[in-house]
Amino acid sequence: MNDTTAATASEVIEKDVLIIGAGPVGLFAVFELGLLDLKAAVIDILDRPGGQCAELYPEKPIYDIPGFPVVTGQGLVDNLLKQVGPFKPSYHFGHMVESLQRDPDGRFRLTTDRGAVFLAKVVVIAAGGGSFQPKRPPVPGIEGYEGTSVHYAVRRMEDFRDHDVLIVGGGDSALDWTLNLQPLAKSLTLLHRRDEFRAAPDSVNKMRELVDSGKVKLVFGQVAGLRGDAGQTTHAVVKDKDGKEIELSASRILPFFGLTMKLGPIAQWGINLTENLISVDTARFETSERGIFAIGDINTYPGKLKLILSGFHEAALMAQAAVRIAAPDKKIVFQYTTSSSNLQKKLGVI
């Protein structure tokens, strides 16, 4: 995978195209744009690429990707990352888009919740059903600890070093971070409702090995409350499977309760919407705002099919339209990767 860029408020990142969403369709858009010499930045609210494929079903088999009789969600993402590698996009994970406006020079200025600023002539919304936002567990007063002790994603592993870490959940994210944070943590407890996990079997086996060796504590139950002051937790109150309350040391808590999808600030950009989806034309996949395109599950048009392969088709046509905005003086010659030495050089195969 290409380097992830940590954009901050101290810099303005200028690209030809900004892609909002790092799922399969957003990643393939990087490829199609790259063939036309357009440089892209990819922004996603999640802490890694892949969108739904990586976050919700990394191990789930997909059977309708052309050329792959079967491929897992994570396998598809890994292959796409390799495919776009020659075009060196910049990735900006853990960023939620807060505002979008058009500057006097016609470019779009986009800012994120972390103060990053991007400038581009074209914006491509490939955000699936919208931004993925973590589900908040139903724990009284948890809001007061969010961002200090309670985190819904791991942005820096060092922030968990030498802490009593409590991870809540039984899916891939919970198991992956149990394995990755255990060497750093002062103590690590994995809490789940029952002794059944939805994660990859290899991860579950490795977790059980850590439990057997005393390096991880495995508890069955649910969080009922938090103890602490000024945003800093000290303990989590847990109701175990027998209904008894116990307290677990916890100065850092990671609840993995899944994700919800919200259109978020996109709904305020003046783009025509149809039942919370973005209306586009089927020749360009452009929205009602010139220079803003929408591809993948977030768009709608007559005959729309919410399939990854449909999103790939949309990305190809979008790129052909986007280049006429981002590089209006560029002579466009349609070429095939199978026969064009020029395209093959860009891909690094010759």
Image: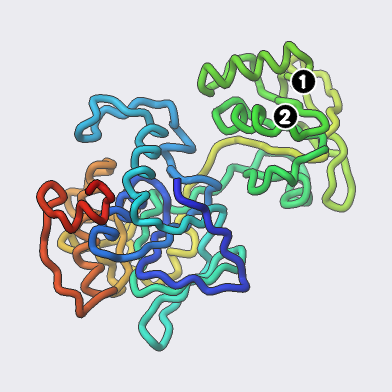
**Which residue lies at the image location 54% right of the left edge and 18% below the top edge?**
202
- Residue 146: x and y, percent? 73, 49
Q: Give the numbered dot on residue 264.
A: none
- Which of the 4 image quarters holds residue 315? bottom left
> In this view, which residue lies farthest toward the bottom?
104
Going by the image, does 247 lie left or right of 56?
Answer: right
SS assignment at label 1: loop
Taking the view exactly as shown, the residue that stands out farthest to the front is: 350
Give the labeled residue for mark 1.
215
- The residue lying at 52 percent from left, 53 percent from top is 4
Quarter holding the N terminus is top left
Q: Please, what secondary structure does the residue beneath circle 2 have? A: loop
According to the picture, the residue beneath numbered tag 2 turns out to be 182
Where residue 322 appears, as percent x and y from the top left, is 25, 68
Q: Residue furthest right?
A: 229
| Residue drawn where x is 63% and y is 29% of the image | 169
In this view, the residue in front, 94 or 292, is 94
Amino acid carrying mark 1 in the image: Lys
**Vertical placement of residue 264 versus 258, above or below:** below
Amino acid type of the residue tagged 2 in the rendering: Gln
**Residue 192 picture quarter:** top right
Q: Check contact, mark 2 vs mark 1: CB within 8 A.
A: yes
